[in-house]
Amino acid sequence: MGLKKAMGILVFSTQAVIGYDYYIQTRDAGLNWGDLSATDYSTILQDRFTRARAAKEATSLAAVAAGDGQSIWGEAASYGKSLLSGGEQVADAQNSEDAPQPVCIRRGNVADC
């Protein structure tokens, strides 16, 4: 039963995304809803994927030519470094504040600060 519901949600979501993309493409082409044929729409999709692949290949070839070619693990490590390097900025921001607000814990009618 749960698998049926999950598949139904997946199919509906896929149709919604394709329908919205079709709407955007017809609007960009200056056509009304339904005027763009399925073959024209598939041609537009193939062109988009081809341009994306070409841009990715050009970027990777330029990186290799410049000697900056990193592996996937190197890119992942650089993301971690950029996330973890923000610690100094947080420490500087905390030191620049005048006085931190006290933390109060309320138990019943008594507040301990």
Image: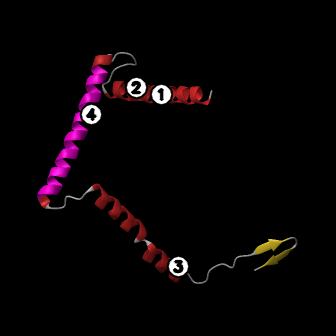
Residue corresponding to mark 3: 94
The prevailing secondary structure element of the residues shown in magenta is helix
Give the Cα distance between marks 2 and 3.
49 Å
Residue corresponding to mark 4: 48
| Circle 2: residue type | Tyr
Give the Cα distance between marks 2 and 4.
16 Å
- Residue at 43% of width from left, 77% of height from top? 88
Residue 16 is tagged as 1
| Circle 1: residue type | Ala
Instruction: Please state, as top left, top right, bottom left or bottom right, where the N terminus lies in the image.
Output: top right
Give the Cα distance between marks 1 and 2.
10 Å
Compare marks 4 and 1 and give the one earlier in the sequence: 1
Which range is magenta?
40-65
Compare marks 1 and 3 and give the one earlier in the sequence: 1
The local secondary structure at tag 4 comes to helix
| Circle 3: residue type | Gln
Of tags 1 and 2, the one toward the viewer is: 1
Compare marks 3 and 4 and give the one earlier in the sequence: 4
* 25 or 91: nearer the viewer: 91
Q: Residues within 10 Å of mark 3 (few under 14, many from 20)?
A: few
The local secondary structure at tag 3 comes to helix
Residue 61 placed where, x, y %?
15, 51
Residue 23 is tagged as 2
Tell me if residue 50 is in the magenta stretch: yes
Compare marks 2 and 4 and give the one earlier in the sequence: 2
Give the Cα distance between marks 4 and 1.
19 Å
Quarter of the rendering containing residue 22: top left
